[in-house]
Amino acid sequence: MVVARSNSGCLPRLLIVEVVSPESVKRDYRHKRSEYAALEVPEYCIIDPLKAKVSVLLVEDGFYEETVFTDTQQIVSRTFPELAIDRS
């Protein structure tokens, strides 16, 4: 999911969410991380149903810091704090 365009061009991407599939593992975990860092996306989430986890990556000092959520941990977006996801 990417917040996309206005009539005047691209809006800044504040949050991107990717869902991993068997065909996209390497692309979602490696290539897109580099691409989104270059675009200065502040928050990037990887939902991995294959491993039953959600990784939330936040920019800290120019690099992504990753927090992994598993089981029933609640996921709260730092960019959109009103967005809270329960994994139960």
Image: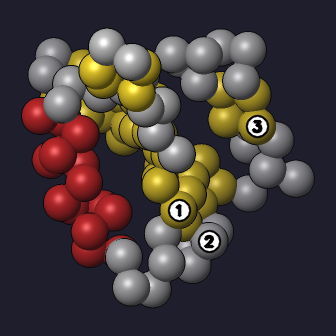
Furthest residue in direction front, as rendered: 7
> Which kind of residue does numbered mark 1 sit on?
Val
* Residue 12 in view, yes or no: no
Judge by depth and name the residue closer to the eye, 33 or 11.
11
> Which kind of residue does numbered mark 2 sit on?
Pro
Give the mark, 1 or 3, whose residue is nearer the N terminus: 1
Q: Residue at x 65, y 26 (%)?
A: 76
Residue on which the image places disc 3: 85
Residue 12 point in image, percent of width and height: 33, 18
**Which of the 4 image quadrants contains residue 80?**
top right
Q: Closer to the observer: label 1 or label 3?
A: 1
Q: Closer to the observer: label 2 or label 1?
A: 1
Asked which secondary structure carries label 1, the reply is strand
> Which kind of residue does numbered mark 3 sit on?
Ile
Whether residue 61 sits left or right of residue 11 in the image: it is left
Residue on which the image places disc 1: 19
**Which of the 4 image quadrants contains residue 13?**
top left
Residue 38 point in image, percent of width and height: 11, 34
Whether residue 71 sits left or right of residue 42 in the image: it is right
Q: CA distance from mark 2 to mark 3?
A: 15 Å
Instruction: Identify the disc placed on residue 49.
Output: 2
Q: CA distance from mark 1 to mark 3?
A: 15 Å
Residue density around tag 1, few if under 14, some if 14–19, many if 20 or more, within 10 Å:
some
